[in-house]
Amino acid sequence: MNQLTIFLAGCVLALGCIIPLRADAQVVLTEVQPLTFGTMIMTSFATPVQVVVHPQNILPNYSGPVIPTVMGSRGHYNMTGAPPNTPFTITYYNIIDAAYGGNPQLTLDNFTFEPAVLVTNGGGVADFFIGARMTSVGGGSPYGDGTYLGNYSFDINF
């Protein structure tokens, strides 16, 4: 049985804004908690393993031949310095599947966020949470012990 730890690094490469900001305004995005899929033991490689980390504050779903030893966690981001009382959207791109050495990759997809309606408060502040799905390839392809790293990027558009 192999023990895998899966971490993701999220980053914002661009903030798009279509409304004017003060010249001294600076939007700051802080990753409070990274999105992770936890640590798990795959008991078989024949059937795909799937882990869904929800953006809501609930436990992840693990399916397939897997035993979680450390639960995954949703990503938590805090944004300050944004336009007050302004809705915004998140667009994901540049998703890099989780990999470790020459082992098969773990596919990352179905990125979601919470709250369902994204809007800054009167002070230009917003907290939001990110979830996603991770899937192994199955078919008997073995995964070695180790920390599998992936990456994703997103734009915030006002």
Image (tube, rainbow, N blue to C red):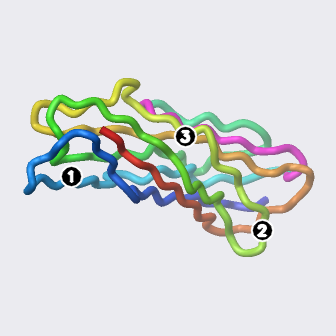
Tag 3 residue: 111
| Residue hosting label 2 | 103
Place of residue 128 in the rendered image (x, y in percent of width and height, measured from the top left): 34, 38
Task: Give percent across and percent down for residue 73.
Answer: 47, 45
Callout in the foreground (3, 1)? 1
Residue shown at the point (57%, 49%) measured from the top left: 37
Residue type, label 2:
Asn
Q: What element does badge 3 sit on?
A: strand
Q: Earlier in the sequence, mark 3 or mark 1?
A: 1
Whether residue 47 appears in magenta in the rendering, the answer is yes
Mark positioned earlier in the residue sequence (3 or 2): 2
Residue 19 located within the stretch drawn in magenta: no
Using the image as rendered, state which of residue 8 and residue 90 is in the foreground. Answer: 90
Neighbourhood count class around disc 1 (C-alpha, 10 Å): few under 14, some 14–19, many 20 upward: few
Magenta highlight range: 45-57
Instruction: Residue 27: give its label.
Output: 1
Q: Against 97, is 100 above or below? A: below
